[in-house]
Amino acid sequence: METSKNEIPFYQTTTAKIIMVGLLALFLLIPLSYVQSLIAERADRKQDVVEEVTKSWGTDVHLYGPILRIPYRVFNKTEFINPETKKQEISTTQSTAFAYFFPEKLDFKSTIQKDNSLNRGLYNVVVFGTAIKCEGSFAKPNFKKLQIDEANVLWEQATVLVKTTNLKSSKSDLNLKVNDTSLTFESKANADKYYDDLQSDVFDSTGAENLRFQFEMKYNGSNSVKFIPVGKNTTVSIDSDWQDPSFEGIFSANTGSKSVTEDGFHADWNISQVNRPFSQEYAELLPQLNEYLFGVKLIETVDQYQQNERASKYGFLMIGLTFLIFFLIQTISKISIHIFQYGMIGLALVLFYTLLISITEHSTFSIAYGIATFAVIVMLFFYTLSILKSKKFSVFIALALASLYCFIYVIIQLENYALLVGSIGLFLILGIVMYFSRKIDWDMK
């Protein structure tokens, strides 16, 4: 059967063109996914550098103590049958165990100062220095609660124990003052792989009704500073010049005391014995109390790679909306745009993200976004000017792209309202497309 002279071949119909442009947009997801992999790779590289630097500089600072440790004698009786007399006898052996007592009052005052001096290649690793002052007192140990006979207590071998992480990055003399006696902390081997043990010299606490103590520790650290409230009444105060803290743990800072400004933050905690479900004294073994850690984590709200990743997630949206603009112009003006030209336009939009990530590593995200946007819009302006032969349409496309990139930038910067603003923006864009496409004859060639 011969084709009618007035019948249009399917490949030249509007439907065929829509299918080809749609398939091309889907095909461009392949290079876009490679760009997203590149961003993830660069982010992983930064994380490796951060971990390498913080291992040498210092990691999380977690402090647990001080704890009064007092040894006592334990007598173990064993019944056995004497092989000679054939009678039952009792053998008694003696060993030493330890009783642990938490402070009556415990007060921590910590100052955290960020240090931006560590650079490794393209990456600026943000770390800090912290000074922690601790003072408080122990009540007279109550051995009756632990069912320990005080006659078996070795008072003259009592020590003070402090458990802390990141001891290798401590920058202070490890001195402890108990009442009027100055003692020296020593690092001791510990089966607990999380904490390092600091143990004071032996001192005689016989008859002490109220043991007052104080010490100060300074660390190079990163990520967080946290405490465990082992005091019957524990108070913690933290001051820092960090602008983006994240207060963590099951204990919240005092209402009205927490403040975050451009100059830093301040927070206070006051925790009593009734707020935590563990005792003041233990025999033989200390419990695991890491779940009661609280304090502050110093964070970067959105770093450059997170922003690039979020921008790349809108890549398909940018390609789809840009192709839609070109297709509507082509349909309204009856100017033919070849599928190859659509491909060049799509590749330019994908290359925007490689420009963005490469410039961001040497500048800020905002500057990189502005430069990449300007470069792509200028390139597409001159390209569309050459294929459409219309300055009016070229200017319109440049303005439309500028509006889309500004819209995406606003969404990226927003955190709590990104979904709301994005949904409203897309709804308005759909309304504009529906308005301009309402009178198009989709059956025309």
Image (spheres, grey):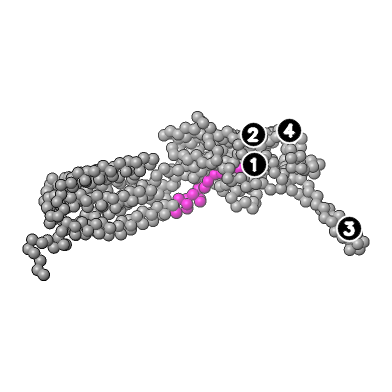
The circle on residue 278 is 1
Q: Which residue is mark 3?
A: 88
Mark 4 and 2 residues: CB-CB less than 8 Å, in contact? no
Q: Residue at x 73, y 38 (%)?
A: 141
**How far separated are the C-alphas under marks 1 and 4?**
23 Å
Mark 2 neighbour class, 10 Å CA radius: few under 14, some 14 to 19, many 20 or more: some
Disc 4 or 3, which lies upstream in sequence? 3
**How far separated are the C-alphas under marks 2 and 3?**
51 Å
Q: Which residue is mark 4?
A: 209
Q: Whole-percent x and y of residue 63?
A: 58, 42
**How far separated are the C-alphas under marks 1 and 2?**
16 Å
Vertical position of residue 440 compared to residue 239: above or below:
below
Q: Whole-percent x and y of residue 339?
A: 19, 59
Q: Whole-percent x and y of residue 32?
A: 31, 56
Q: Which structural element holds mark 4?
A: loop
Left or right: 229 in relation to 304:
right
Disc 1 or 2, which lies upstream in sequence? 2
Q: Which residue is mark 2?
A: 105
Q: Looking at this rendering, what residue extends furthest in the top direction?
A: 256
Q: Nearer the viewer, residue 1 or 11?
A: 1
**How far separated are the C-alphas under marks 1 and 3?**
42 Å
Residue 97 seen in render: yes
Q: Tell me which segment is drawn in magenta.
A: 48-67
Q: Amino acid at mark 2?
A: Lys
Q: Which structural element holds mark 1?
A: loop
